[in-house]
Amino acid sequence: SNTLVQNESINKTEEIKDSILEHLCFNLGKSPRIATLHDWYMATAYAARERMMRNFVSYTEKMQNKTLKIVGYLSAEFLMGPHLGNALINLGIENETKKAIEQLGINLNDVLEQEEEPGLGNGGLGRLAACYLDSLATLQVPAVGYGIRYEFGIFDQYIRDGWQVEATDKWLRNGNPWEIVKPELNYTVKLGGHTESYTDDKGKYRVKWIPASEIKGIAYDTPVPGYKNGVTGILRLWKSEAVESFDFHAFDKGDYYGAVHEKVFSENISKVLYPNDVSDEGKRLRLSQQYFFVSCSLQNAFHILHLRGLSIDEFPESMTFQLNDTHPSIAIAEMMRLLIDEHQVGWEKAWDITKKTFAYTNHTLLPEALEKWSLPLFANVLPRLLEIIYEINSRFLLTIRDKYPGDEDRVRRMSIIDERGNKSVRMAHLATIGSHAINGVSALHTKLLKQDVLHDFYELEPDIFFNVTNGVTPRRWIKLYNPRLTSLITTHIGESWVNHLETDLVKLEQYADDPTFQQAWHDVKRQNKTDLAHLIQAIVGTKVNPDSLFDIQVKRIHEYKRQHLNVLYIAHLYNRIKQKRTDGITPRTFIFGGKAAPGYVMAKLIIKLINSVGETINNDPDVNGLIKVVFFPDFNVKNGAHIYKAADLSEQISTAGKEASGTGNMKFAMNGALTIGTFDGANIEIMECVGEENFFLFGLHAAEVAETKSNGYRPYDIYNSDEDLKQAIDMIQSGVFSHGDTGVFQPFVDTLLNYDPFLVLKDFRAYAECQQRVSDAYTNQKEWTKMSILNVARMGKFSSDRSVKDYCENIWKVNHA
Ligand SMILES: CCc1ccc([C@H](C)CC(=O)N[C@@H]2O[C@H](CO)[C@@H](O)[C@H](O)[C@H]2O)cc1
C-alpha cells in the first residue's frame, strides 16, 4: 500500500542523506558547516556512485560467465554529458535525493550545476555512443565502451564581438568522482621504429617490431547505470603515461628536459580531443591516439578472454567489437598483429577470427570526412601494422581479380591503398574488408552508402550491409531534461514508456484532441520556454518573448547543415519588416547554437553573421521585437537540457543526402517540437512516423541535388531571379548587418553566389514558403498543440533501445532484455 511506499521512500531519503554526509566527511574531509556547493556535489556524486558500484561489481562477476558474448563499443568519442542527474534517474532515487539535499539546506539543481561536463566528443557520433551505453545497460547487454580519457575535451566556446573564441576545457580541474582508476589494467603500446623478420625455433617465419617508443595505457572505468534494473555497465577510457616517467641518467647529466621528455611525449597521446567533426586533418598525433586506445582495448579483450578461461578460437563467440566510424578501424590490423605476432596464430585462422569479431558503422558520406592516412606517415608511426595491411590488401585483391577478371579499375577502386598522388591508406576500405557487417545510420544514408561510397563492396557482399537507424535515450532526453512533460505523460499513460518507448508512448495519441490535456501540454511548453527565456536573458542579455514561436537550430556549425539558409530567411523577414510588409509574420525568436571546428573559417564566419544579424535586428526599433535572434554560446549536452524542451520548431534543413541521420531532430520531436526539414537522414523516417501532415517538409531530394549539380548549378542565376533572395543577400553584402563594413561577409557572399556547394539558393524559395506555412499553422494554437502531441506519441521508434536491439539481433547476435 502507499503508506508502505511512503515509508520506504522516507527511509531511502534518510539513507541517502546519511550517505552524503558520510562521503562529505570521509571522502572530502569537510563538515556541513564549511562545505561548498562543489563539496556537496562531490559528496552526492560519491553517494550515487556507491549505489552503482554494488551492481558494477556483480556485473563484472557476471561477465565471467563463459557463454556470454560481450559487446566492445570502440569509439574515439563518448559525449556522456553530466553524470549525476542521469545516475539519480536510472537508480530511481531522484525524488529521495532531492528531499535529502533539501533537508541539508541545499537545492538539487544548484548541486547539479556544479558538475563539469565530460566533453569527450564533438557532436552526433560521440553522443550516439553515450546514448547506446545507456541502452546497453538498460537492456542488460554485457558491454564495454572503449575510448580515450582526454585530459582536455571539446573546447569551451565564448562569443566575443560576435566571433567564436575557443578556451581549453579543463574538465578534470576539480577532480572526477565518477571514474575509478585501474592501475593494474595497464598495457604497453608500441609506436614508430621498424620491423625485423626471423625464423622462430619451430622454423616458422616471424616478424619482430622494434618500436621507436613505448607508451603505457592505464584504464579508468566509469560506471554506466541501466534504467532501474540494478545493472551497471562500463565505460573504460585509456590514459597514456610514460613507461619510464623520469630518466634519472639524463637528469644526472643535467639534461632536465631530457629527463622528462618521454613523460611529456607519452602523456601527449591522450592529452586532447581533436575538435573537428568532419574534415580529417591526418595528423600524426591523431593516428597515434587511435592506435593507442585500440591496442589497449584489444590487449584488454585478450586479457578478459584469458580470465574467462576461453581459448583464442572462441574469441568471436565471446566478444564482438563495433567500430564507431573509421576512427578505431586500425583495430582490424591490430587484431591480426596480436593473433599472429603475439599468439602465433596462422594468417587464415587469424583473418577468420578477425572478420567474425568486427562490425563497422559509417556515420558520414562527406568525402572530406573519410579518413585517408598518407602512406609515409602511416609507415613511420605504425610500420608493422602497414605490413599487415599490405598483406590483407593483396589477399583481398586476389579475390577481386578472381571474381572480376581483367577489371583492374575495380581493383584500383577497392584497394585499401589509394595509389593516386602521394598514396594513402583508405580506412573505410580496411574497416569494410575486415568486418562481417557494415551499417549506415538511417534508411536513406544506408541506401546512399550502398549506391555510392561503398558501392563496389556492396556489389561484392550485399548481405553484410544493414541499416540501423539512430536513436536517443529517453531517460536523459525526456525524463531527466523535461520533468514537466514527463509527469504529464506519466500521469496519463503510466511510466513504462521510459524503457518501452516503441510500444507505449503511442498511448498518448488518445489525448491529442482532448482540450484539457492540450491546455496542460501547452502550459508545459510555455513554462519550458519561460525558463529558457530567463537563461538567455542571463547569459546573452537578450530579452525574448516566451509567447513568440521558438525556432531553434542547434548542432555543429557546418555548411551542409545550412545554418546560413536559416540566416538568409531571417534577413529576408527583416527586409519585409523594414518595408512594412509584415502581414503573416508571426512573432518569432530564432535561436542558434553550435561550435565550429577552430580551423573551419566559413563556419566561424557564419557564427559572426548570425550574431551580426541578431545585433542589428534585436536593436532596431522598427522591428520592435516582432522577431529576435539569439546565438546561445557553448552548446553542449548540459545546455541542451534547457534548449530541446523549449522548442516549438526544430530546424533540420541540411542539403538532402548530406546528414547521415541527425539525432537532434529526434530529441526535439520527442519533446513536442514540430520539424521543418528536408528529405534527408532520419528526417524522412520521423516524417513517416509522425505523418506528413505533422511535419513541414521542403526542398530538393538527394537525387535532385545530384542532378542539379551534374547539370551545372549556377547560383548567380537564382540570385538574379528571386528578388527577395537578392535583397537579402545585398543587405548582407552592403554592410546592413556590419555597421557598413562591406568586407567582413564578402567571402560568404562570394562563395554563395559563385559556388553554393550545398544549394542554399536553390532551396531558398521552398524554405521561405514552408516557413510561411509554419507561421500560419502557429496562429492556430489548438491545432499546433495537437500536432505536437501526435509528434511525441509517434516517436517511439527513435529510442536508442530500438537501435541497440537492432544491433543485438542483426549484427552482434546477442540476447537483450
Ligand atoms: C576525421 C574527423 C571526423 C570526426 C568525426 C566525424 C563524425 C563521423 C561526424 C559525426 O558526428 N557524424 C554524425 O554522426 C551522427 C551519429 O550517427 C549522425 O546522426 C549525423 O548525421 C552525422 O553527421 C567525421 C570525421
Image: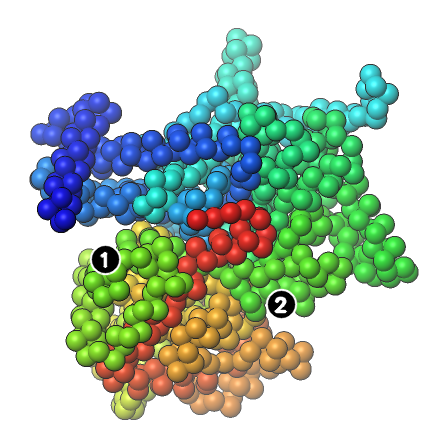
Q: Is residue 627 visible?
A: no
Residue type beneath disc 2: Leu
User: Which residue appears at 68% of the width and 41% of the height?
Assistant: 354
Kindly identify which numbered label has been placed on residue 316: none
User: Which residue appears at 50% of the width and 30% of the height?
Assistant: 64
Q: Count of labels shown?
A: 2
Secondary element under disc 1, as helix, strand or loop, is helix
Q: Which residue is mark 1?
A: 483
Residue type beneath disc 1: Pro
Q: Is residue 1 visible?
A: yes
Q: Mark 2 or mark 1, which is nearer the start of the sequence?
A: 2
Q: Which residue is mark 2?
A: 448
Farthest residue to the right: give it: 406
* Distance CA(mark 1)–CA(mark 2): 38 Å
Residue 459 location (% of width, % of height): 74, 63
* Camera-side residue of 585 and 695: 695
Tell whether circle 1 marks a residue whose Cβ is less than 8 angstroms from ligand 1. no
Residue 496 placement: quadrant? bottom left
* Camera-side residue of 204 and 158: 204
